[in-house]
Structure formats: C-alpha cells, structure tokens
Amino acid sequence: MKFDLKTALKFIILFLIGIGVLYLAFKGQDLRKIGQEIKTAYYFWVSVSALSAWLAHVIRALRWQLLYEPIKYRVNFWNVYHAVIIGYLANLALPRFGEIGRCSVIHKTEKVPMFASIGTVITERLFDVLVLFLSGLFILIFQYDIVFNFLHDTIYIGFVNKIQTLSYVWLTVIVLILLLLIGFLTYLLKQKVGRKLLKIFVSLRQGFGSYRKLKQKWLFLIYTFGIWFLYFCSMYFAFSSIQATSGLQFNAAFTAIVFSGFAMAAPVQGGIGVFHWAVAQSLVLYAVSFKDGLAYATIIHSSQVLLILVLGSLSLLFVFLKKEPNK
C-alpha cells in the first residue's frame, strides 16, 4: 500500500471524524457518572466477553485457512491466526488496512501471492456482510415496531431537522462538494481502468473461486455461524458487567450486534465513536438510558481494543522473529 501525504491526510480526517462522533455521543452526558459505572463494573463478565471475542478470532482464522485449500496452498494455522490478529491491530491505526496487512503476513510467512490472499479475504467478508444483512432483516421482521420507530424518529426526523436548519448557502456547498467527489472518483476510475486493473482482476479471480471449489462448504458455513454466535455471546455476557444492562435479554444483544456491525463498517479507526453511538442507541430501544448505553459500549470496546493490542503485539513479535520459508 502506497503511503503518501494524501493517504496520511485521508486517515487523519477519518480519525478526526471518529473523534467528532465520539464527542457528540458523550456531549451533554454526565461523564462523572459514566466513569463511576465503568469503575464499578464486574470485570469477570468483561473478561468472559473478551474471551468470546478472542474465540471468534480463532474461528475466523480456521475459516480463512479453509479457503486456501481450493487454490492449492497449504498454510499453517498459526501463521493464519497471527495474520488475523495483526490485521485487527492494523485496523486500530488505519481503517481497512488490516485486510491488506494480514495478506502481507501470509505472503511473508507462507509466500502466498498477495492478490490470491486478497481474493480469499473478500470472499469471507462477503459472507460476513450477508450474515449482517440477514440479521438486520430478521430484526426488521420480528422487532418491526421497535426498529421502525428508531429509524423514523432518530434517523429520518433527525436528518430532516438538520437539513431544515441549514441555510441555502450551506446546502449549495454540500451539493457542490458531492458533485466534485463524484467527478474525482470518475476520473480515477478512468485512469485506473485498463491493463493494470485487468491484471489485478485475473489475480483476484483465483481467490474469489476459493469457496466455489471448496469441498467442505458445510464446515465453512459452520465456522461463519460460530464467529457470529461468539460475537453475540461477547455482547450478551458484557450485559452483566454493569447494573443498568444486567437485565437485558438475548434480543437486545442480537440488536446490539447488528447495530455495531453496521457501525464497524464505517471507515474509522477501530470504530471509535460510531461504535459507541450505535451500541448506545441500540440499547435505548430496550429502555436503557443513552448514558448507561455509552458506559456499556465504552467497556466492551475498550476491553476488545486492549485484547487486540496485547495479542497483536505478541503476534507481531512472532512474525518478525519467524524465519521466512524457502518457497
């Protein structure tokens, strides 16, 4: 990945956006009470929640390893595991860089071509997106009243009110910026389309075909279910960490997972800000105050970031000390 001034500015802007969302989420809240809730949390349940998240990472490594078999690469599980953890670590610094980062680790430790690995990563991510959208659809069907009121009252009405408060000058500026962005993206596409893009597509196709050629499709699907089930467990177990959320049931954890899943899709380092806001909003639907929801979101987000920082550092050390294979 080429890292120049424009790239650096992009990531700085994304980070500032995340900080801005975090500020808006906590604006007007009683920070002293939120801090007190975090201090008095039951950290046994926080640890159980973090353990569930770690097991999800382990299963993700097993699922990814499975996708290499159809494209004729035998990769060691521990190399795949370290690559996954390092990928999460990279995402804390640079959004979406983790996918490239873990492919780089596999290239270093197993000599698998980068684009073949990227194809397998895209394949597994497509399944994750599918699960997320199906889960969202499930919530819309079985908890329609709760979710519809949120989408209408919080999202739609809030957006309309914001638009109405803007002057015509600002609206014109926003429209012009959007048009410039569309024009710039169109220009970039025209510049990139050609031999280079075709070469990349041919390389990626090998990875894309990994699931289609997979003999153990059922095992891949079981791993996928296991990953999301453990995410759910991580969210549910953490409910018991503070009094305000200890009485919540499975449906609240399921909704929080979906909301947080869409939030983590935002190109912001570690989901900072957007994760906190989305999880807190999801718990408001179940009669938890936004303040308590923020305390809960801060606890679970901080525990998982700490987990990745520790495990990611160990994985980096392992990869740096490991001798490269002769292939």
Image (cartoon, rainbow, N blue to C red):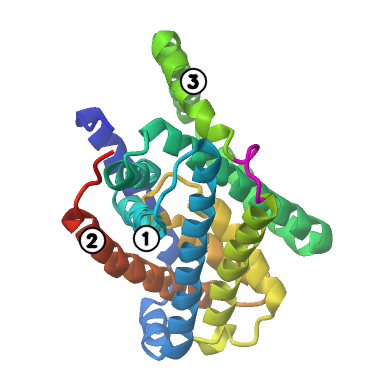
| Element at label 1 | helix
Q: Secondary structure at mark 3?
A: helix
- Give the left or right position of residue 139, taking residue 83 as reference: right
At which x and y percent is residue 8?
23, 36
Q: Which residue is mark 2?
A: 318
Crowding near the residue tagged with mark 2, few <14, some 14–19, many ≥20 C-alpha atoms within 10 Å: some
Separation (CA) of disc 3 from disc 2: 32 Å
Compare residues 177 and 129 and report the one nearer the observer.
129
Mark 1 or mark 2: name the one nearer the start of the chain: 1
Query: Residue placed farthest to the left in the image?
Result: 321
Place of residue 294 in the rendered image (x, y in percent of width and height, measured from the top left)? 47, 71
In contact (CB < 8 Å): disc 1 and disc 2: yes
Q: Earlier in the sequence, mark 3 or mark 2?
A: 3
Q: Earlier in the sequence, mark 1 or mark 3?
A: 1
Disc assigned to residue 236? none
Q: Find the magenta span and give its range.
A: 211-216
Label drawn at residue 78: 1
Please indicate whether residue 210 sits to the left or right of residue 320 in the image: right
Query: Residue at the spot x=56%, y=56% of the render?
Result: 261
Give the number of the disc on residue 202. Answer: 3
The amino acid sitting under disc 3 is Val
- Furthest residue in direction front, as rendered: 326
Q: Residue at x 66, y 52 (%)?
A: 131
Dots 3, 2 in contact, CB < 8 A: no
Q: Amino acid at mark 2?
A: Phe
State whether the magenta stretch is mostly helix, strand or loop: loop
